[in-house]
Image (cartoon, helix red, strand yellow):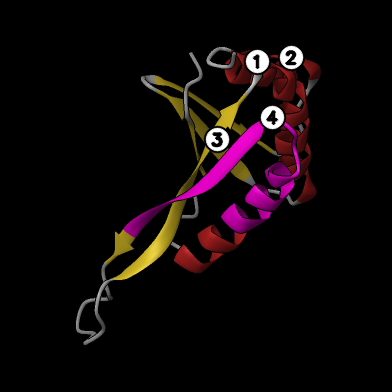
Amino acid sequence: MTQRLRLEVPSDGDVLRQERELRSLRKALDGINGAIVGHAESTVEPAQGSKSAPALADAALWLVLSGGAVRLAATAIREWASVQRGRKVRLTRGEEELEISGKLDPEATRALEQFLGKGSS
């Protein structure tokens, strides 16, 4: 059975940066054969004292992989994280969580591939 993964980009409250990073990550994953990716939206409340209505923001991505796409997705995520210093992505599947950032050593790359491969068919 194929499970959905949730990918979040921690942004210390900077919603615009978070959306920009998520779109960049989605673009890196979109072209992979065997990967289905989409935005998980949430409501963002306006700043206190503002008269604006709540807005939808891209809070995270969801990702579903078939078995053959695991290594390609791991490579895309690894390369995305290494482009900019301080880039992080948190992957969640059920109760399991993995956070990666920056350049990954071979051990962290294997951990990422194993995490991605657990729910794929």
Quadrant hosting residue 50: bottom left
Q: Position of residue 104 (x, y in %)?
A: 75, 28
> Which label was assigned to residue 63?
3
> Which is nearer the N-term, disc 4 or disc 2?
4
Residues in magenta?
Answer: 21-42
Q: CB of mark 1 within 8 Å of CB of mark 2? A: yes
Per the model, the C-alpha gap separating discs 1 and 2 is 6 Å
Quadrant hosting residue 17: bottom right
Quadrant (top left, top right, bottom left, bottom right) of the C terminus: top right
Q: Secondary structure at mark 1?
A: helix
Graded by Cα atoms within 10 Å as few (under 14), some (14 to 19) or many (20 or more), the crowding at tag 4 reads some
Q: Amino acid at mark 2?
A: Glu
Q: Is residue 25 magenta?
A: yes
Per the model, the C-alpha gap separating discs 2 and 3 is 23 Å
**Who is closer to the viewer here, 119 or 54?**
119
Q: Is residue 72 magenta?
A: no
Residue position marked by numbered label 1 in the rendering: 111
Q: Which residue is located at x 27 percent, y 76 percent?
A: 47
Q: Position of residue 74 (x, y in %)?
A: 72, 28
